[in-house]
Image: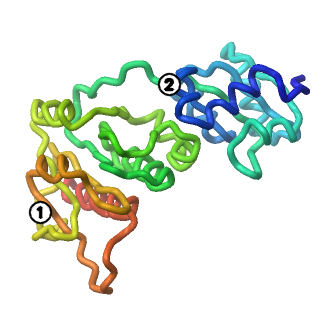
């Protein structure tokens, strides 16, 4: 039973709220039964887990499963768990997972997503979740995008982190990797000439979605083979980055079928 706020596990959990803490510990935080379940199902390395009663039957089964797999699971109080979590009303279970050491492009990569300059954690997490749902093989994040393992991104991803190859590469490395795999680069931008359904979005492609404020970077614009726009007859200036990305990804899947 962990009953002190100075416990090393609680200190580490709090440190993982920041990007510097995650890099130093080479770990990230999972909050909630569903996320920990997803990690366990994927065989993702978990260092330890903490829970606070009362746990549902589902939570109790998960704790038993983790212990059976050799993961150290300890009990703490709801008050201390709240200090370790990042939400004001935390779920009764958290875990610390290893950051991936070196992520390589999957050999079969023909369908990729590039969130470029997407700084909003909720948008990035939603993009990852949508990409995982629609069969994207890899997501590449150039500099300027949010940390994919920040707590809010992980929560919004809802397990996508355990299903996707997530790479962080500068454009100088990213573009040659895409070209070697024969991927065409399609950029979503208000200045595009064609609507998504007028363009060929069938693989092998990499879809580029720009950030919320300034859109995609100059490097992304220069690299794009084609620029498409999402028509907005209602007269709005732009769409949420996650919505724009979802529309492009779904149109690609539609064309694949």
Residue 191 placement (x, y as % from top left):
16, 70
Identify the image quadrant of residue 201: bottom left
Badge 2: residue crowd in 10 Å (few <14, some 14–19, many ≥20): some
Q: Is residue 94 above or below residue 248?
A: above
Residue 75 placement (x, y as % from top left):
85, 27
Q: Residue furthest bottom?
A: 234
Image quadrant holding the N terminus, namely: top right
Q: Secondary structure at mark 1?
A: loop
Residue drawn at (30%, 85%) of the image: 235
Q: Is residue 52 above or below residue 9?
A: below
Mark 1 and mark 2 lie on one chain; the one further toward the N terminus is 2
Q: Nearer the viewer, residue 140 or 54?
A: 140
Residue 176 placement (x, y as % from top left):
13, 32
Q: Is residue 99 left or right of residue 238?
A: right
Q: Nearer the viewer, mark 1 or mark 2?
A: 2
Residue 87 placement (x, y as % from top left):
70, 49
Q: Count the marks.
A: 2
Q: Secondary structure at mark 2?
A: loop
Q: Is residue 40 left or right of residue 85?
A: left
The numbered disc on residue 35 is none
Q: Is residue 226 above or below residue 235?
A: above
Q: Is residue 32 left or right of residue 238?
A: right
Q: Nearer the viewer, residue 234 or 106?
A: 234
Residue drawn at (79%, 33%) of the image: 51
Badge 1: residue crowd in 10 Å (few <14, some 14–19, many ≥20): some
Residue drawn at (33%, 44%) of the image: 135
Image quadrant holding the C terminus, namely: bottom left
The numbered disc on residue 199 is 1
Identify the image quadrant of residue 181: top left
Q: Dot 2 corresponds to which residue?
A: 99
For the residues labelled 1 and 2, the Cα–Cα distance comes to 37 Å
Residue drawn at (21%, 34%) of the image: 174
């Amino acid at each position: 039973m962990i009953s002190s706020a100075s416990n090393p596990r609680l200190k580490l959990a709090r440190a993982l709220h920041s990007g510097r803490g995650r890099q130093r510990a080479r770990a990230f935080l999972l909050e909630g039964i569903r996320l920990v379940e997803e990690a366990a199902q994927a065989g993702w390395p978990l260092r330890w887990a903490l829970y606070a009663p009362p746990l549902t039957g589902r939570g109790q089964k998960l704790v038993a499963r983790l212990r059976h797999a050799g993961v150290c699971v300890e009990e703490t109080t709801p008050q201390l768990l709240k200090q370790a979590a990042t939400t004001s009303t935390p779920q009764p279970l958290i875990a610390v997972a290893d950051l991936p050491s070196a992520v390589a492009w999957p050999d079969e990569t023909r369908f990729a997503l590039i969130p470029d300059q997407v700084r909003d954690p909720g948008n990035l997490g939603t993009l990852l979740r949508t990409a995982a749902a629609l069969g994207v093989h890899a997501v590449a994040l150039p500099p300027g995008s949010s940390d994919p393992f920040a707590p809010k991104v992980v929560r919004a991803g809802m397990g996508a982190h355990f299903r996707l190859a997530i790479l962080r590469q500068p454009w100088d490395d990213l573009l040659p990797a895409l070209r070697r795999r024969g991927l065409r680069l399609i950029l979503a931008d208000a200045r595009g000439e064609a609507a998504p359904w007028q363009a060929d979005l069938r693989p092998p492609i990499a879809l580029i979605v720009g950030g919320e404020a300034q859109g995609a970077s100059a490097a992304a614009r220069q690299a794009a083979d084609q620029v498409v726009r999402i028509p907005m007859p209602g007269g709005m200036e732009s769409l949420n980055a996650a919505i724009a990305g979802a529309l492009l990804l779904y149109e690609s899947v539609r064309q694949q079928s």
